[in-house]
Image: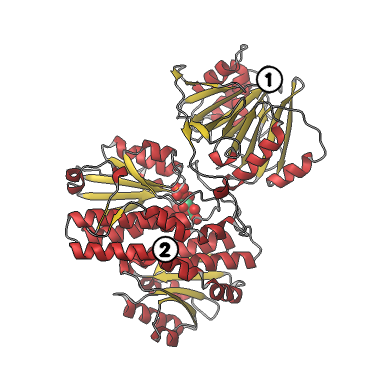
Amino acid sequence: MCGIVGYVGPQQAVPILLEGLKRLEYRGYDSAGLALLQDGGIIIQKSAGKIRVLEESIKGMQFDSNCGIAHTRWATHGEPNDTNAHPHTDGSGRISVVHNGIIENFRTLKQYLERKGHRFNTETDTEIIAHLIQDNYQGDLFEAVRKALTQVEGTYGIAVVSLDHPGEIVAARHGSPLVIGSGNGENFIASDVSAILRHTDQVMYLEDRELAHITADGFNVATIENTEVTPEIEKIEWSLEQIEKGGFSHFMLKEIYEQPLALNNAIRGRLNFEEGISRLNGLQLQMEELLSIQRIIITACGTSWHSALIGEYMIEDLARIPVEVEYASEFRYRSPIISDGTLVFVISQSGETADTLAALREAKRKGATGLGICNVVGSTIARETDGGIYIHAGPEIGVASTKAFTSQIMVLALVTLLLARQRDMSHEKGRQFVDAIQKLPSQVQSILDESDQIKRLADMFSDHNNFLYLGRGINFPTALEGALKMKEISYIHAEGYPAAEMKHGPIALIDENMPVVVIALKDQVYDKVLSNIQEIKARNGRVIAIATEGDEEIKRLANHVLYIPKVMYHLTPILSIIPLQLLAYFVAVNRGCDVDQPRNLAKSVTVE
Ligand code: F6R
């Protein structure tokens, strides 16, 4: 949510900042701007719209700056116009700030500053920070920022420059990620490593309530209480190639096609066929601790919440441990019961989602062991959990989550196997499970190879304004996820339901204009789903069935059939979601939507 990038060093800052912003654009894209220290002054350029609008607006201008900060915004306070775009300045125009997060006490601070004579030009909470820094300034920028932040409540990742301090950036973090990139005679600050990976793979993640003073020669870090922190440099494992489109027209399509590879990465070194088991050392749990688990709570948001629901079906059915799944935004504000033997899993692709992080902290506060299933290595959630499992899906840039979803389910299958084999699952069943898991990447590939068929279907249905998605059992969450993919990237209203619930309300919507996507696999609920299809057909609904290869019967009922390979029931969502991802993608492209950056959305939701 919002992106920050900053540079100080011998190179021209503008190209580095613009390139960094473009790589961060997936985090927020309603306005963008930059502040440059040049010739003893600060140059600020900002505009509503995407980065290309900003780029266009500064075309032909000559810059000569070696130090600057930049921002791409996802609006929280104030509409996305030129004025509200970051950077923001204090009244004197000497200090400039970019900010991610929300200042919760900004009204109180505004009144306090107004009483002292400060005047404000924007509707943003960020402008307050610039004024507050100025209010605390007595010749030391770092100290002024530090003091200002002791007055602030809320979340922030900020970068600050001042014309009185050429060649210096002060950055601070509380609840909104920031990473310092360490270069050779140059340094960087960014909200996400992708912005600076072209220049350095040596980084230091700032922790909450830490500030950094950055120059070309180095950086110092201290806490907000002014205790010095020894920087720990880490190496980024992601390559530049991984964060580029590599010939695909969209990141989302690239990421859909990366799923066989991502699934292989998720299982690499973690399965043992002979023994029919999985090994997940990252959980940091001893055998006795795993055996003493009485109950599991899984909490997450959005797509990750859907994978959690699939995990619930898998773990309860196969490991026989009670599982509850809850939206992180709900979990954090009630008083969840965490009894002895309760394990809490949080699932997050980004590892930065504000509600999920807060839920993790709440669970840990109540004494639970908090484990994570994350993609981004070094992310806040990954660092704050007691243990966890990385899904190793590689960077996911498309705002709509695809490969992270299937990789999360894969990891949940490994967790299930681990827990089930300690309990009732036999050696033979364990081996069958391992065998089925290992076949999944090539089965996903075989569905991707048939994408033309899905494209043809998308061409037929792209002008519809509503879609219904139905599934039962473990594929009910798949229906939810299919509907989410469709609505978020194509702006078509789509709803997911458990198939049998249809007759308790949604059936009223069905007529010849309502495409209904039904996941109708040859499993224990197949006959029940066929009855649901009959009910739709009786009302002239148009059925697109996701069916098991070799099922001829379904052809007589459904208007269109997309086949997926046969697989063990508990692993079916990894296959059944693939055609639904592709269907949403092709429909969105046909409708001319911005697939990778859908309106109003942002990757990594770091505000509540
Ligand atoms: C939908 C999507 C979102 C995320 C949600 C949680 O395609 O991507 O619903 O799943 O914002 O994000 P993470 O997994 O990063 O916590």
Tell me the amino acid under the disc marked 1.
Answer: Pro
Q: What is the basis of the colouring in this image?
A: secondary structure
Q: Which mark is residue 166?
A: 1
Outermost residue, top side: 138
Instruction: Name the one closer to the observer, 505 or 400.
Output: 400
For label 2, the residue is 441
For marks 1 and 2, give the CA distance: 53 Å
Mark 1 lies on a secondary structure that is loop
**Looking at the image, which residue is at 31% across and 69% down?**
568
- State yes or no: Cβ of the residue under disc 2 lies below 8 Å from any atom of ligand 1: no
Horizontal placement of 126 versus 256: left or right? right
- Of tags 1 and 2, the one toward the viewer is 2
Q: Quadrant of the N terminus?
A: top right
Q: Are marks 1 and 2 in contact (CB under 8 Å)?
A: no
The x and y percentages for residue 418 are 25, 53
**Sequence-wise first label, 1 or 2:** 1
